[in-house]
Amino acid sequence: MTDQHPIVQAGAPGLRARSQEVPQEKLGTKELSDLVQKMIATMRAAPGVGLAAPQIGVPWRVIVLEDREELQAKLTPDEKRERERIAFPTKVFVNPVLKIVGDEKAMFFEGCLSVKGWAAMVERGLEVEVEGLDERGTPQQWRVRGWPARILQHEVDHLDGKLYVDRMVSRSFSTQDQAKELYGGKPIAEIKRMLGL
């Protein structure tokens, strides 16, 4: 069954618990494959660029992510460049282990499918390396910087019971519509000035 699933919203206890490792015997099973397909369908329907299993009520350490060109259509070339936002195909990580590479950080607005309609500035590591398995149990790793690194940090946070609001610069918290209206198309340095950061 690959139908999309309702997305659990902030306040649900499952979003605040550490997810469990997917057991060895579940790797390569129809159950895990169905979960991954359901997560991808849900992420695309939202539409979003990432989803963690707890967001559909499953307490397992599984994330999916992708960033398609059409999801970036409203960004200016400067915004894409500043965010280091690149399109990439669907990635699945089971039991991911993420480490931040280097000390470089970047701050941008983030939203979340489990905090619907809101956004805030979040500072995150600019480059990360993630290791884990795919749904068949094949080991994989990915070292990446820019926007994909941000998505990975956001999704792995979900597996540890954290939401972006725990890391946000609280004075930037805004409805998504308001954030787009006030800050859309502006460089991050100007947005920071406007917010007094």
Image: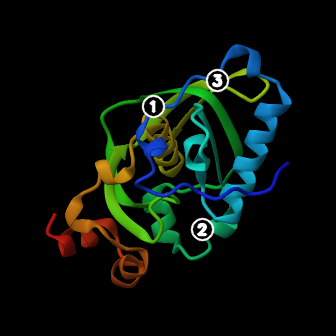
Dot 1 alpha-carbon crowd within 10 angstroms: few under 14, some 14 to 19, many 20 or more: some
* Colour pattern of the rendering: rainbow
Looking at the image, which is closer to me, 155 or 81? 155
Is 77 situated above or below 150? Answer: below
Measured Cα–Cα span from mark 3 to mark 2: 32 Å
* Amino acid type at image mark 3: Val
- Residue that protrudes farthest toward the front in the picture: 13
Measured Cα–Cα span from mark 1 to mark 2: 31 Å
* Amino acid type at image mark 1: Arg
Dot 3 alpha-carbon crowd within 10 angstroms: few under 14, some 14 to 19, many 20 or more: some
- Residue that protrudes farthest toward the left in the picture: 196
User: Which x, y percent locates residue 15?
Assistant: 46, 45
Q: Disc 2 marks which residue?
A: 72
* Mark sitting on residue 18: 1
Residue found at x 75% / y 55%: 41
Tell whether 52 sits left or right of 172: right
Cβ atoms under marks 1 and 2 closer than 8 Å: no
User: Which x, y percent locates residue 133?
Assistant: 68, 24
Q: Nearer the viewer, mark 3 or mark 2?
A: 3
Is 74 situated above or below 2? Answer: below
Q: Which of the 4 image quadrants contains residue 74?
A: bottom right
- Secondary structure beneath dot 3 equals loop
Q: Disc 3 marks which residue?
A: 22
- Secondary structure beneath dot 1 equals loop
Measured Cα–Cα span from mark 1 to mark 3: 12 Å
Labels 3 and 2: the sequence-earlier one? 3
Residue found at x 35% / y 45%: 124
* Amino acid type at image mark 2: Gln
Cβ atoms under marks 3 and 2 closer than 8 Å: no
- Secondary structure beneath dot 2 equals helix
Looking at the image, which is closer to me, 52 or 11? 11
